[in-house]
Image: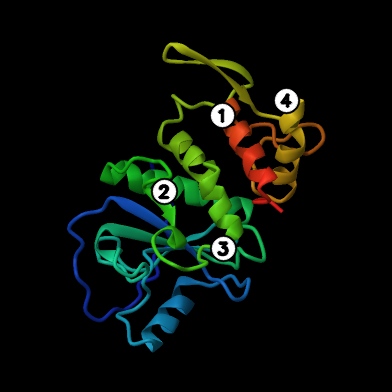
Amino acid sequence: MSVKIVETNLDFTSLSERSITNMVVLHHTGGNDIDASAEQIHEWHKNNEWAGIGYHYVIRKDGTIERGRPEWAIGSHAYGENSHTIGIHISGDFDAAVPTKKQIENCAELVADICTRYGIPIDTDHVVGHGELMATSCPGTNLQALLDNGIITGKANYYANPSEAKPVDGAKQEGNRLTERFNSLSSVPEWAYDTVKKMVDKGLLTGGGLKDAGGYPADLDLSMDMLRIFVVNDRAGLYD
């Protein structure tokens, strides 16, 4: 797997090497929905008298992935959890806005690459939002929803194992169990349709880029279990 990273060649003071990596933590800018760059964040963090940017990667609104702190170094992004984690900053305020389609897709691809290289399970126990580790609103309600409903980890698993997770409509055999997959709005059961359409309209479900005749995603790759989770979350007001 090859992920395009824009090298920023930022200068740091003292850095320490991380000896274990077993979790990926997602963050947002917060406060203002700005397209913060790694260089900007680097200056902010240096002004705090840190060694430099605390995140290892920054994903801009157009999907560009910029190098932050060297991946081998202990970050400064999740107090008490830095020694074993890699931090990814997604630029924007995701209490007020939603990540762009490019940010979602490239974040999933980056997560897949990191987890594959370090042997980290691609699931919601190991790919988490900052607020799951401590009391903070980061990474924003809308980005956290993409973690909670398995969108980011689901896409990351697809990027890590495309031959095993190729999205198709209808039925797919997984081991000894036949599971249905739903790629388009028209294929979604009536009881889940309104929820899925709401998530598509809000940009929480984007697919991989294929569109149907109506301009809606045609490669959502949703399972029945995912639909049930979405509906429960929707009834709880998570997507409002």
Front one among 12 and 108? 108
Secondary structure at numbered mark 4: loop
C-alpha separation, residue under disc 4 versus residue under disc 3: 30 Å
Q: Position of residue 218 (x, y in %)?
A: 69, 32
Looking at the image, can residue 207 be seen?
A: no
Q: Which residue is mark 1?
A: 225
C-alpha separation, residue under disc 3 versus residue under disc 1: 25 Å
Which numbered marker is on residue 189? 4
* Marks 4 and 1 in Cβ contact (< 8 Å): no
Q: Which residue is mark 2?
A: 111
Q: Is residue 30 above or below residue 140?
A: below
Q: Earlier in the sequence, mark 4 or mark 2?
A: 2
Q: Please report the residue visible at 72 percent of the width from the left and 25 percent of the height from the top.
A: 189
* Marks 2 and 1 in Cβ contact (< 8 Å): no
Q: Earlier in the sequence, mark 3 or mark 1?
A: 3
Is 23 positioned to the left or the right of 3 in the image? left
Residue situated furthest top in the rendering: 176
